[in-house]
Amino acid sequence: MSIKIKLIPKVLHFKRPAGTSRGSFSIRKSWYILIKSEDGRMGIGECAPLPDLSCDDIPEYEQILETACLDLEKNLKIDYAQFGNYPSILFGLETALRHFEQNSFCLWDTEFSKGNKGIPINGLIWMGSFEYMREQIEDKLQKGFRCVKLKIGAIDFEKELELLAMIRKHYPAERIQLRVDANGAFSPNDALDKLKALSAYDLHSIEQPIRQGQWDKMYELCRNSPIPIALDEELIGVNQSQKKAELLDAIKPQYIILKPSLHGGIKGSDEWITLAKSRGINFWITSALESNIGLNAIAQWCATYKSDMYQGLGTGLLFTDNVDLPLYLEKDMLWFNSASINEEQIMNWLQK
């Protein structure tokens, strides 16, 4: 069998700038891997490193991606040894190849891919003014979300506490699960005090309270925090199995959060989950601002774990010019309808 691979760069536009503690995104650049064979089969994968965050956000990214595609064309398999430090490239290669081999956007055989079961997701509240964040919270709660995640660390901390108090005034923890994501915004000196203040609002967890790379300080926080801590950015760039085990043993977090584009592709994320489970560490899966191509692949893979945790899989719905894939929300459940896939429409979107 011979295959040909075409690389297609695209720029997507956010409906509204997506604010984090590292700044705001208004556009999103992705590269799409298109595999084709002589018998008409195809596979599509998305490569989308996050600026200033991904370990493979480097100037020569496109050249390395081209090399990886040529290597796959020639050898018909992914060279994990050569491209192990490029998680977003691995993710695009893995999912394009999976799509090609399955000859379907139903990448794994699950109840989700059959349209029989949805995936529960959290409602994401983007950073912004107090009013903007309040509007988002009210919108998500009205739509029926039972888990809300707030990105914090950009506005005044007291204002953020006020937002959490507003939610808890009307929605106790039995009705609404609250998560917060600091994206490393707290300093080690005041992090524990802030965690204690946040604990008054019955939070499920906090993601990455201090910036990554401070293993001793993060361990102390995980040991003493009144709120369970989830690692996210901490896992970025840790691509060898032994180093992953060392990190988990050194920090002992309560949760880890897996984004395949950031954390080793599908294979690397599976490895994180295996290592975490063996240590009694729970996990959930989220996307990293991919279009619906990447989001579909992550959701399909996520469904193989049959987790009852709220996942973070709604980001593909943020763009004005997203590809039309049959992913849709009913309240806080993400669903997939394979019967309504229009491959011609997807190909037209990809190549226009």
Image (cartoon, helix red, strand yellow):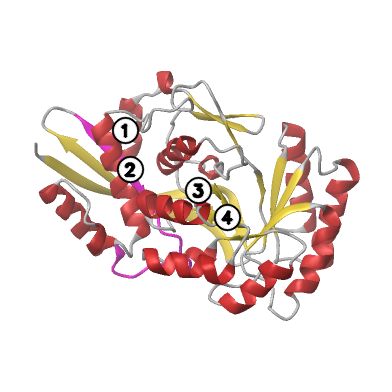
Determine which of the numbered discs, if any, sits on residue 95 in the image.
2
Whether the magenta-drawn stretch holds residue 49 is answered as yes
The label nearer to you, 4 versus 1, is 4
Q: Residues within 10 Å of mark 3 (few under 14, many from 20)?
A: many
Disc 3/disc 1 C-alpha distance (Å): 24 Å
Q: Residues within 10 Å of mark 4 (few under 14, many from 20)?
A: some
The label nearer to you, 1 versus 2, is 2
Q: CB of mark 2 within 8 Å of CB of mark 3?
A: no
Relative to 245, is 8 on the left or the right?
Answer: left
Kind of residue at disc 2: Thr
Residue 239: x and y in percent read 38, 64
Q: Earlier in the sequence, mark 1 or mark 2?
A: 2
Kind of residue at disc 4: Ile
Provide the residue designation for mark 4.
Answer: 281
Disc 1/disc 2 C-alpha distance (Å): 20 Å
Relative to 209, is 196 on the left or the right?
Answer: right
Magenta-drawn stretch, dominant element (helix, strand or loop): loop
Whether the magenta-drawn stretch holds residue 90 is answered as no
Q: Residues within 10 Å of mark 1 (few under 14, many from 20)?
A: few
Query: Which stretch appears magenta?
Result: 41-61
Q: Earlier in the sequence, mark 3 or mark 1?
A: 3
Residue 315: x and y in percent read 54, 45
Residue at 84 percent of width and 66 percent of height: 158
Q: Earlier in the sequence, mark 2 or mark 3?
A: 2
**Residue toward you, 142 or 321:** 142
Residue at 35 percent of width and 51 percent of height: 267
Q: Earlier in the sequence, mark 4 or mark 3?
A: 4
Kind of residue at disc 3: Ser
Provide the residue designation for mark 3.
Answer: 287
Residue located farthest toward the top when viewing the structure as drawn: 339
Residue at 55 percent of width and 54 percent of height: 257
Determine which of the numbered discs, if any, sits on residue 348 in the image.
1
